[in-house]
Image (spheres, helix red, strand yellow):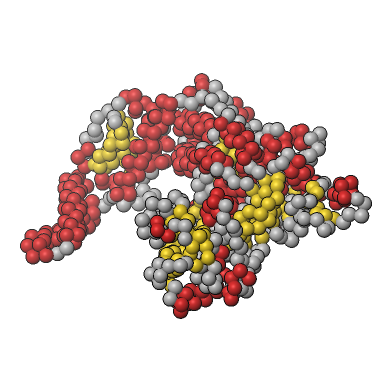
Amino acid sequence: MLVLQPRYGGTIANQIRRLGASCDWSRERFTLDEQLSRAVIEAFVRLHEKGLIYQGSYMVNWSPSLQTAVSDLEVEYSEESGALYYIKYRVAGGSSSDYLTIATTRPETLFGDVAIAVHPKDDRYSKYIGMMAIVPMTYGRHVPIISDRQVDKDFGTGVLKISPGHDHNDYLLARKLGLPILNIMNKDGTLNEVAGLFCGLDRFEARKKLWADLEETGLAVKKEPHTLRVPRSQRGGEIIEPLISKQWFVSMETLAEKALRVIEKGELTIIPERFEKIYNHWLSNIKDWCISRQLWWGHRIPVWYIVGKDCEEEYIVARSSDEALEKARAKFGKDVEIYQDPDVLDTWFSSALWPFSTLGWPDVSAEDFKRFYPTTMLETGHDILFFWVARMVMMGIEFTGTIPFSYVYLHGLIRDSQGRKMSKTLGNVIDPIDTIKEFGTDALRFSIALGTAGQDLNLSTERLASNKAFTNKLWNAGKFVLQNLPDQNDATWESILAYKFDMEESLIALPLPECWVVSKLHLLIDMVTSSYEKFFFGDVGRETYDFFWGDFADWYIEASKARLYHSGGDSVAPVAQAVLLYVFENILKLLHPFMPFVTEELWQALPQRKEAIMVSPWPQTSLPRHANSIKKFENLQALTRAIRNARAEYSVEPGKRISASIVASEEVIQYISKEKEVLALLSRLDVQNVQFTNSPPGDAEQSVHLVAGEGLEAYLPLADMIDISAEVERLSKRLSKMQTEYDGLKARLSSPNFVEKAPADVVRGVREKAAEAEEKIILTKNRLALLKSTTPITN
């Protein structure tokens, strides 16, 4: 089921469809659908009947521009530059020297001060405890000076102003001490009549004017820079104002206890595991949930008030206006008039019911509810673990008696290439549709899926371009396989289909490259299946990527060309064709969850496909693999790499075929020599001049000696590789230039003036350059000596 907002729902749904999400789109739901609205009202009524929903005036996070309360989870704190204001509070009845200096970041809240607190053991202020202080700019309003251990002696001046109407900590302290609560602010962020002459001013304008007036009256001590932890609304970004307001709350303690218990019992697993600690910490320290919002859009709170009665004392909770009126008449008579609470419910209240409200609840006999609830897994972003996940767990247990899912997989957030959160302000928002047009859906999906659970992903064009290249590589590999398979009616198919890869004896009978790649595939299937079961999706993508590109495309496809295009032709081609088809179709299956479009297209193009890849069986696990063949082919790979590196080092023309003598033990020669054509093809050797021997050849002194591994060496005749005379001349000139540069470096290092007076890092840099130059000179001299030793032979 999808949670979609009305304004953006169409856009989001289109993006999800284009991304290839295989949802049952006939079950798409909207938050305000009739069925979902019925579930929301039912949940509210039941919670209220159990005493878990109550109304009261408490401190909330108030958004002045949105004119609504927001939950603690919707407040984001940021470190910002601000100021600490030091203000004098005169002691009533004292001399001009009797005053307390208070440090505050919000001087405008002094109009709401109800007390001044100091630490009982702070000798600086103990003589004032029990006296009264005069609040500045309030025409002499007095507040008591009290003591409390909660005061931090070391912060600011060690004196705390208590403004319980506008600070969460002050509010709790005032409730503990029985102090009154004074509200100085209107709902729009302007100061009210309590602020006197400052009434009607915006809170920030009032701050500036108040400080100027304090300076004028001599009550301003100083103002110094201070880093503030500023609460901002997640929705609008404005600074949140702590405010006392009448709201509806859900009592969370009993609900949270049950949600904690399912983690303790292992009934609910959160992936990655580290988020279980965060989940437990939040639920263990949970506050009651403010669920009412002063917005025009949402589920109306199902509460009705009696005209002429106190709203807090007399109200009716009902499932409909008709039911509310019936209840009101029963209690107050037939002429009673009622009106509904204008507030709406926090959108997360309805979202918390989503796993079962979308399936027909409260009708527990609904077919969808019986069939699909509870489900197995929830996949969502780690940023809404508290907003949504924990609340779904609590509500699921409360209303259905069971958790809505057994696993919670938390993905990371997509950030830009610099790791910044996407925002319109920064102009770094990436539209999936635009990305798909440029790079393709499969490349985008693969890029995102390679992320690690719970860890944010920096999405760059480089990453997308790389995975677009991977998609193209997969497509080209598919073209190669298809081009090298016979026509559907060809008799060769009988030979191809005769190969079976699920029996060990059949596997061992395969030639070395084929046995190697099939064994590696079977290992991959086991690793990938295990990673899928553990929800290690990033590992699945990386393991499959490495096998396809590093093993199948780079090695086996190239090796298969020796079967398909060279000697042996028709007699050896079927084994390569069978292996190409078998390995490639299994790669498509493993990649399909990541890249559904290209894999389905390639799958359908393969011969003898009877069903879509999406519904085809998953590859079988625990298939045979031959470790010895893997080791043998790795030796062949090491030998090929050594020859390729030598060719590159001596700048041998790509198309030139060279001779080689392979020196190894009888056992190694036996399996390497069988793949002489593969070795020659991969290393660009002259197949007619590849010799296998157990001792160095006669021209070893005039050859490049390569050690590919223990007991496996190669000798490449230099005369085959390069024009020795031209190379000698080139290296001699290069050596002369290198020697001149080296001599210059040594001369600088031999100068006491340079060594003693130059900065240490400069001297160190010259020494490192000299050492590097000396090493290059030695290597060049050695190569020259080798080349010169071969000159008589080449002549």
Can residue 465 be seen here? The reply is: no
Direction front: furthest residue: 93
Residue 766 x %, y %: 17, 59
Q: Residue at x 51, y 24 (%)?
A: 624
Q: Is residue 439 left or right of 696 when viewed as pictured?
A: right
Q: Is residue 229 left or right of 187 when viewed as pictured?
A: left
Q: Residue at x 31, y 38 (%)?
A: 660
Residue 75 x %, y %: 57, 56
Q: In the image shown, does 244 or 506 lie closer to the viewer?
A: 244
Q: How many marks?
A: 0
Q: In the image shown, does 154 or 537 lie closer to the viewer?
A: 154
Q: Residue at x 52, y 73 (%)?
A: 137
Q: Residue at x 38, y 55 (%)?
A: 122
Quadrant assignment for the N terminus: top right
Direction top: furthest residue: 505
Q: In the image shown, does 148 or 690 lie closer to the viewer?
A: 148
| Quarter of image, res 218 | bottom left
Can residue 412 be seen here? The reply is: yes
| Quarter of image, res 245 | bottom right
Direction right: furthest residue: 334
Q: Is residue 360 above or below residue 86?
A: above
